[in-house]
Amino acid sequence: MKIDWVAEGFAAMRDCGEDISIVYGRVNKGPRAEPEWAELPHDKFDGIGGFGHLLREHGCPVDELPVLNADSLTFSRAVRGLVAVSPALKVRTQQWRNFDATRSATFRPVAQRVAWKLLTEDETKSIVAAAKATGVTVNTLLLFHLDRAVSAQLTPELADRLWMIPVNLRGGLPRQHPEAFLKMSFFPVDLQGRPSVGQVQARITSLKDRHCHWGSWAALHLGKLIGAAGIRRELRKRDKQNNSWTGLFSNLGVWTVPGAGHWVFGPAVSRAQPIGAGCLTLNGCMALTVQLHEALSDNLQDTHDLLDAWTEPFIQATPASVDRSGLERFGERISA
């Protein structure tokens, strides 16, 4: 069997002491009840594949997983994307207000490290409508507010940020890649100062136009040039150099699955991506999570504070009945 080099990268992270668990939670008794948590290893599942797996385990029909539309891997796109993404692959050091690189993952129970919120259908519709009124995607709107919250609470005011945004590649990979069970890549979204939501959208659109997701896919498979042992040596070397992005924001998209109820989702974190934020919209309700690596904080209250700062702007902006003028005012405020 051929090696999935994306999966091998996550296995190497685990061997270097990191917790590579993707977390999911089934909310059984309403939005305030503690979810029924499940953890899946990232070297066996990507976020979407893991969620589909859990839904089927709970007897919920999921015939097809979300796919990448009107986009596919070609040699020229991979080469162009690799050139575009290469600056983000260098060793970088994120500036933090407080960061202790000596702290390792402690493998605490999920409830002790993940903060979550399940939004109502009205709140979810308001976010979707606000993104549309502002001329951006929901993903961009959420990243914009997440970045503002992080720059206000965790990084120095003028520090640059670099976000990893996973990309689902299902439907875009050729059939000669059946061994790739982690069908994912990423966009590296670098932000400086206080960009407007429109500027964040422009940055993401540029990354897509330059095929950075296919370049990232190619880069993730370069591990075969140095082998499994070489990947682990490289990770340990980068860790000693305090290599760190700001974090990652993963959105599993919009799902309609009768009988599934409500779920929450959170990506894995590491010292190299110490902030993990997750989004999942299921049966009309959006769920958001935040997780901090122990190097940033092992105090769950800090995680809750970041989640509150992230969600406060758009939850406060949810009107009892959404009207166009209100959405336009919301759009003007977040673009400032």
Image (cartoon, helix red, strand yellow):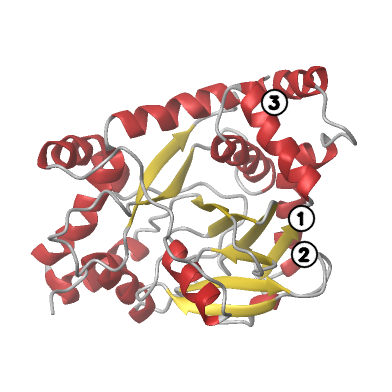
**C-alpha span from label 1 to label 2:** 6 Å
Q: Is residue 18 left or right of residue 334?
A: left
Residue 301, disc: 2
Residue of label 1: 305
**C-alpha span from label 3 to label 1:** 20 Å
Residue 104 in view, yes or no: no
Sequence-earlier tag: 3 or 2? 2
Percent of width and height locating residue 226: 11, 66
Mark 1–mark 2 CB contact (< 8 Å): yes
**C-alpha span from label 3 to label 2:** 26 Å
Viewer-proximal residue among 209 and 281: 281
Residue of label 3: 334
Q: Quadrant of the C terminus?
A: top right
Q: Is 59 rendered above or below residue 127?
A: below
Q: Nearer the viewer, mark 3 or mark 2?
A: 3
Q: Identify the amino acid type marked 1.
A: Asp
Percent of width and height locating residue 201: 50, 28
Q: Residue at x 64, y 30 (%)?
A: 131
Q: Is 25 rendered above or below residue 78?
A: below
Q: Residue 197: which quarter of the image?
A: top right
Q: Is 65 rendered above or below residue 187?
A: below
